[in-house]
Amino acid sequence: MNKKDLFLGFIIGIATTILGSYLFITFFTDFKFIAGIQIMKSQGNLGKIITLGSILTLIEFGVLLKMNKEMMARGIVLAVIIVALFTLFI
């Protein structure tokens, strides 16, 4: 059960980061999502967009801790670490 909760938290963390990036590009730029990703990558700002998108995981982390879902919260922390490493290499 613990590995399942950890994996589920990881998937939720990655999905929340993608959702946050989508919302940021959609609301704060004039581009569609895919075109915005391509333009931000060509400008060298893709890592910043992904980092801003991961702000939603902070809210989700707090909610899971409030619900006593510690293993899922650990999965979210793992997702944030993986996203941070990913942004270093792009």
Image (cartoon, helix red, strand yellow):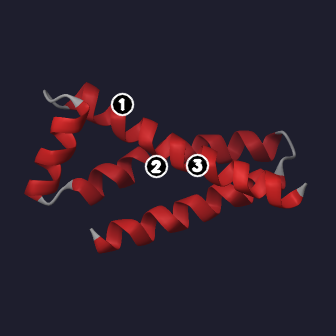
- The dot on residue 9 is none
| Residue type beneath disc 3 | Gly
The foreground one among 1 and 69 is: 1
- Whole-Å distance between the Cαs marked 1 and 2? 11 Å
Report the residue at 67% width, 48% height from top. Answer: 61
Q: Quadrant of the N terminus?
A: bottom right
The residue carrying mark 1 is 23
| Residue type beneath disc 1 | Leu
Q: Is residue 18 left or right of residue 37?
A: right
Residue 77 x, y percent position in the rendering = 63, 61
Q: Disc 3, disc 2: CB below 8 Å?
A: no
Q: Tell me if residue 11 comes above or below residue 36 in the rendering.
A: below
Q: Is residue 9 left or right of residue 14?
A: right
Q: Secondary structure at mark 3?
A: helix
The residue carrying mark 2 is 54
**Circle nearer the N terminus (1, 2):** 1
Q: Is residue 48 left or right of residue 12?
A: left
Q: Tell me if residue 37 comes above or below residue 25 in the rendering.
A: below
Disc 3 vs disc 2: which is toward the camera? Answer: 3
Report the residue at 62% width, 64% height from top. Answer: 78
Q: Secondary structure at mark 1?
A: helix
Q: Secondary structure at mark 2?
A: loop
Q: Is residue 62 left or right of residue 20?
A: right
- The dot on residue 13 is 3
Q: Residues within 10 Å of mark 3 (few under 14, many from 20)?
A: many
**Circle nearer the N terminus (3, 2):** 3
| Residue type beneath disc 2 | Ser
- Whole-Å distance between the Cαs marked 3 and 2? 8 Å
Report the residue at 46% width, 62% height from top. Answer: 83
Q: Residues within 10 Å of mark 1 (few under 14, many from 20)?
A: some
